[in-house]
Image (cartoon, helix red, strand yellow):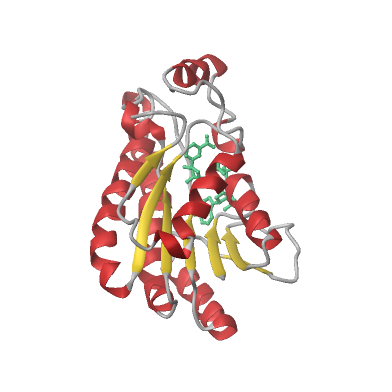
Amino acid sequence: MIILITGSRKGIGRRLAEHYLDLGHKVIGCSRSESELEHENYTHYLADVTNEKDVKMMLKGVRKEYGHIDVLINNAGIASMNHFLLTPTETARKVMDTNYFGTLIMTREAARLLRKSDHGRVVNFTSVAVALSLEGESIYLASKAAIEALTKVTAKELGQYEITVNAIGPTPIDTSLIAAVPKEKIASLIDKQAVKRYGEFEDVINLIDFYIKPESDFITGQIVYLGGIF
Ligand SMILES: NC(=O)c1ccc[n+]([C@@H]2O[C@H](COP(=O)([O-])OP(=O)(O)OC[C@H]3O[C@@H](n4cnc5c(N)ncnc54)[C@H](OP(=O)(O)O)[C@@H]3O)[C@@H](O)[C@H]2O)c1
């Protein structure tokens, strides 16, 4: 399969890229800074998902190289955690731009290449923060809630092209995204989960493997939170 993963320089995106390369797939990744991942089946683009020009340039390259995409994983994301009274507008716009607009732009522009697949798949990233209405995460949470809404509507609108669109909502996973979050805050969040532990990369891989397999062509518009948050 041809799999495009945004934000594949580090964290979850990097681990996903390694996983699908190990399985023998062709992987295209992108980020704003250079990647150190080297593999004969891996192509990395310096592309900011908020920048339409970057996204179009990248997809032009993908079209030339492969002609289509089977899977788009909209993993790129940033977080800003603060009391909303202390959140500058600029920060709020940046989070919305990366998380929501990045997902929207990439999905819209990649749809043409996904339509050429026998079973196109889009996987978006939300967070358990939405289900829990977590304090201190109003902006991040709003951007992810918007992604959930986009997931449901695009699932309907892309269904006629046999493209499924689903979302995964991880619990805390030890990456740089949450490095600045106080440990006691993470502990109290984990305490709200039915399964009380950090998420692992393998938990994410497990669900995405399920979403993208050909037999999952009847599963679309779904939001699955990890760890037992509902
Ligand atoms: N870790 C968690 O606890 C957790 C929990 C719930 C949900 N999530 C979600 O999981 C996804 C991955 O998070 P992570 O923990 O792996 O974060 P991370 O370790 O901070 O990695 C984020 C990745 O996204 C890239 N990126 C950021 N802005 C970008 C942009 N505008 N254009 C292109 N690439 C961009 C970064 O590379 P550059 O900086 O080089 O651009 C990096 O490769 C995010 O959507 C996040 O919201 C994570």
Residue 5 in the image: state x and y as whole percent: 54, 60
Q: Residue at x 53, y 54 (%)?
A: 209
Q: Residue at x 23, y 62 (%)?
A: 156
* Residue 10 in the figure: left or right of residue 76: right
Q: Quadrant of the C terminus?
A: top left
Residue 151 in the image: state x and y as whole percent: 31, 54
Q: Does the image show residue 156?
A: yes
The part of the image, by quadrant, that contains residue 18 is bottom right
Q: Does the image show residue 75?
A: no
Q: Is residue 151 above or below residue 109?
A: above
Q: Quadrant of the N terminus?
A: bottom right
Q: Is residue 146 above or below residue 48?
A: above
Judge by depth and name the residue closer to the eye, 93 or 64: 64
Q: Residue at x 38, y 42 (%)?
A: 224
Q: Residue furthest front?
A: 215
* Residue 75 in the figure: left or right of residue 230: right
Q: Residue at x 31, y 47 (%)?
A: 148
Residue 154 in the image: state x and y as whole percent: 28, 61
The part of the image, by quadrant, that contains residue 24 is bottom right
Residue 221 in the image: state x and y as whole percent: 30, 53
Judge by depth and name the residue closer to the eye, 95 or 73: 73
* Residue 67 in the figure: left or right of residue 84: right
Number of disc labels: 0
